[in-house]
Amino acid sequence: MTSTTDVARKSGTFSIGGDLPVVRLGYGTMQLTGEGIWGPPKDHDEAIAVLRRAVELGITFFDTADSYGPVVAEELLAEALHPYPDEVVIATKAGLTRQGPGIWTPVGVPAYLRQQAELSLRRLKVEAIDLFQLHRIDPAVPLEDQVGELAKLKDEGKIKHIGLSEVTVDELQAAQAVAPIATVQNRFSLGARNADALLAHSEAHDIGFIPWRPVADHTGDTGPLAEIAAAHDVTTTQIALAWLLALSPVMLPIPGTSKLGHLESNTAAAGIELDPDEIEQLNNLGG
């Protein structure tokens, strides 16, 4: 069996908030839930096995949300990994509610965010949430009230660090005026580059950048991506992940899967070394 430190750890580490070191190649739990991110996993035993194997492969950063399932992903994490190894960091999110498959509604009412934090504490079986992220900014509630409630939870010791999801640089700066922001999580990949400015700001301020759908927006049957993958004898998905890791030291990709084989393949991307010319070619593919 592959050593617990051999694979994912090749991606290097980043300290969330300056005091929570994580291996940069993480794991996202969204795909563990049912079709449309709704309901229980198709194969419960394999979902548990995937989470445990991720730890064996050296992954220490796990991203989830109260809306995945809903609640299913958080419960699976606790079932598979609690009591958590000392190096494991759990990030969860609240503020994006589910009324059914494909139906998402932001709710940033402070009392609701507090309630969801308390429920996540219970489901994850932790005394403090390592990273609690506002899943979406609710346009009906002042941003300072939403972030302010998370700051109160942090002051109370219920969360350690605050993150934001799907924000602009201006929104991030407005939130930073209320409380320290440790991470941002935006859609970003070879084929989805709308958050380049946010990545640059994050790197300048040592804020972790968590790209969601990190490999879902590229097509690699032809062109530079396919050629680079062939040169390394790997898949285009693995090259897309390797490119993300090479792009910035604050990048924390969280590819997710419900299959053990896919997990092994994704994690192996941490060992791919791209040369500067290859990185430049991939940079120029930006969609």
Image (cartoon, rainbow, N blue to C red):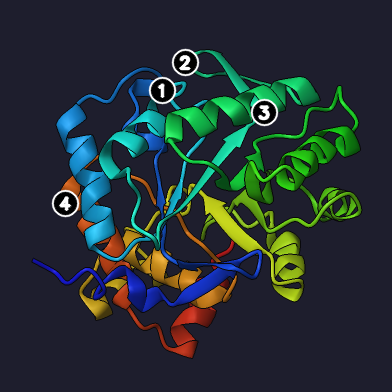
Please state the total of marks drawn on the protein image. 4
Q: CA distance from mark 3 to mark 1?
A: 18 Å
> Residue, x 52% and y 41% (percent of image)?
127
Q: Label 3, on which residue?
A: 95
Q: Earlier in the sequence, mark 1 or mark 2?
A: 1
Q: CA distance from mark 3 to mark 4?
A: 32 Å
Type of the residue with mark 1: Gly
Along the horizontal axis of the image, is 202 left or right of 125?
A: right
Q: Which residue is mark 4?
A: 261
Q: Nearer the viewer, mark 3 or mark 2?
A: 3
User: Disc 1 to disc 4, how far (Cα)?
Assistant: 21 Å
Q: Earlier in the sequence, mark 3 or mark 2?
A: 3
Residue 237's spot in the image, x, y percent?
A: 34, 59
Q: Nearer the viewer, residue 17 or 214?
A: 17
Cα distance, mark 3 to mark 2? Answer: 17 Å
Find numbered disc 2 in the image and state the secondary structure of the residue it sits on: loop
Give yes or no for contact between labels 3 and 4 (Cβ–Cβ under 8 Å): no
Name the residue tied to disc 2.
Answer: 101
Q: Name which residue type carries label 4.
A: Gly
Are dots 1 and 2 in contact, CB under 8 Å? yes
- Image quadrant assignment for residue 257: top left
On the image, the x and y values in percent for residue 163 come to: 67, 49
Circle nearer the N terminus (3, 4): 3
Point out residue 156 in the picture as x, y percentages from the top left corner. Answer: 72, 42
Quadrant assignment for the N terminus: bottom left
Q: CA distance from mark 2 to mark 4?
A: 27 Å
Q: Which residue is mark 1?
A: 36
**Does any portion of residue 35 appear in the rendered image?**
yes
Mark 1–mark 2 Cα distance, whole angstroms, equals: 5 Å
